[in-house]
Image (cartoon, rainbow, N blue to C red):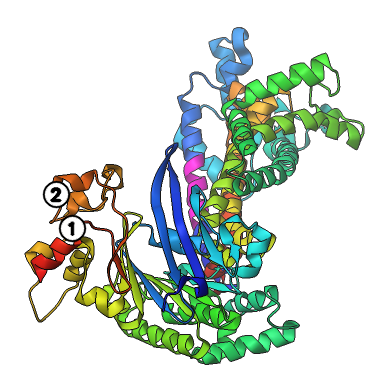
Amino acid sequence: MRFALRLILPRVGLAILALVAISLITFTLVELLPGDAVTRVLGRNATPEREKVWRERMNLDRPPVVRYTLWFSRFVRGDWGESLVSARPATEGAPGGRRNRAVADMVWPRLKNTLILAGYALLLYIPTSLFLGIITAVFREQRFTAWLSALVVLGTAVPEYVIGILLLLIFAITLNWFPPLALIDQAESTLEVVQMLTLPALTLAIAMTGIAVRMMQGSLLTVLDSDYVRFATLKGLSRRRVLLLHALPNALGPAVRVTVLSIVWLIGGVVLVEVIFTFPGLGMLLLDSLRLLDTPVILAAAMLLSSVLIFANLAADLLAAFLNPRLRTD
Amino acid sequence: MTVSNEAVIQVEDLTVDYLDRQAWVNVVNRMSFSIAPGETLGLAGESGCGKSTTGFALFGYRRPGSRIRAGSVQFEGLDLLSLDERALQHIRGAEIFLVPQNPASTLTPSMRVGRQVIETLESHKISSGRREAEERTLELFAQVGLPQPGEIAQRYPHQLSGGQQQRVVIAIALACQPKLVVLDEPTTALDVTTQARILRLLDRLKTEHGMSVLYITHNLGVLAQICNRVAVMYAGELVEVAPTAELFNNPRHPYTRGLIAAVPRLSAPNEDREKLRGLLRREELPPGCRFAPRCNYALSECSTQLQALTTVGKDHQAACWLWERVAEEVG
């Protein structure tokens, strides 16, 4: 267990540094965009007087440094602030004079949705790509492997939005098998949720499979060509035993690591796919709040997405370490 | 010593190609040799000349991305090159055993070394039952001089030294009691003292169990110590075969002379004439003698004239039509 701590502790320190940097960069970038939440909300109805009143109300009249410091000091204490724009649902009333929605209430349900979608995609593509990776590596001298590899490369080469729109046109619009909109917050049954999630998850899975297959394949090919696999073969072990006990355990470590790292791409892809299928996830929220320049929401969403990536990285390293006796026992 | 019909293994016309960017490149060309019971045959040649490829072919094995274009490997009345994987399983390890070059990469990193011995015993039904296999493993470890066998068996390969790793490999070989052991530069990756110890261990096992050995190396010094006969390879072809003393005293092929001259010596300075020039370039092999571009004796015809092994002395063959001239000149 000591090695796990040795692995985790320095990374946690780095992760905190990275998150601070990300919040700073995000804040600066939003500041650099033309206009602010007030101009976005008022739009054509803007007059200098109205803008002044709104700006005071939103605290936007203070200098950026002060606003960032204020946001940061509250954020680390767990207070993520309120949206500049979104109003609290009427039913909740307005205790303490607060009128706007708490950022945390907006962000967490969306993160949950995004993670459900990403999880569904993972569930689809991890077993598929492990299987395809193993098949293409083991039967590399067979002709069908070349076709399979070509197909996989095609899947990777076509961007998510093309795959998504194609699936949408075929399975939702023409065949009517799945709903075109993935509004899972309005779903009435679990079955309906799964139905709504299938096309977006499939889009992500197709895009991700290519990368993951090649990771698994590359990792296994290296191992299959290794001295120890040849030695195991020439000891007279059966092919199955060589593959299952000598090759796969040593190929899985690097493959799992890279596959978990591919969650980075997955999160990037999720944003696109959420837009295509109007899916109420964190990506959509990020996009909507960017449109309104709703800084507190943007910051919170960015921090959450970054945390997911950092966590995936850490998990990848830990998994790989546990699968490698060299790291486990020293 | 080398009557072919009582040979343990007989290789005929072995020809192997490698796939290099869509084109087949020849690496082993028409190799023929045999090994008698109890004999140690040395296979010498520089890196990349096809020694290991030849060694693997004795197991009916080819590296991925290569093909065995022609030839046969006769072992106990079977042609190993025409057997399927399942039939080969019973011969690999049990009858013919490989001790590879680099012990650090030979054992599977994710498996405790004891298990790697036990699984071999079980696969070849050498021990009946797990308990017996475990006990046998500890005996074997003791036999090859591993201290605290019980503790070593629980370790992963990376927790052993290079010498210990090679002892584990030899322990597996010992368990199988094969008729033929292919030693593919078994000591190159070890330091000199460990090398000497491993060589002594191998020699003891060879005499105790009467195994035949194919010893692959580029180190002529080692071959001189342990081999009955030596075969010299150049660019995938055999260029000279002779009993060890004969080969070192009366080398007939210019390449063999070059190899011997290349061994560093303290006593006599090496003759310039014998020194090897240049490098083996597979892309530029002439249609005739493959060694001609680097040969100090070559005539212009050598590059076009195909060379085959011819008898040049008792049990001594060389593939050079100028062998008499070479012999005379050197005296």
x 62%, y 61%: residue:
A249
Q: Which residues are magenta?
A: A12-22
Count of all numbered marks drawn on residues in the image: 2
Left or right: where does residue B260 sit relative to residue A110? left
Q: Is residue B213 visible?
A: yes
Label 2 sits on what residue type? Answer: Leu
Q: Secondary structure at mark 1?
A: loop
Characterize the local packing of mark 1: few (<14), some (14-19) or many (20 or more) Cα atoms within 10 angstroms.
some
Left or right: where does residue A197 sit relative to residue B95? right
- Residue B299 is labelled as 2
User: Residue A307, position in %: x, y?
Assistant: 59, 46
Tell which of B20 and A99 is nearer to you.
B20
User: Residue B216, position in %: x, y?
Assistant: 38, 69
Label pair 2/1, CB-CB below 8 angstroms? yes
x 51%, y 75%: residue:
B6
- Residue B178 is labelled as none
x 58%, y 60%: residue:
B79
Q: CA distance from mark 2 to mark 1?
A: 9 Å
Characterize the local packing of mark 2: few (<14), some (14-19) or many (20 or more) Cα atoms within 10 angstroms.
few
Label 1 sits on what residue type? Answer: Leu
x 44%, y 47%: residue:
B18
Q: Is residue B230 above or below residue A55?
A: below
User: Residue B281, position in %: x, y?
Assistant: 26, 48
Q: Which residue is under mark 1? A: B322
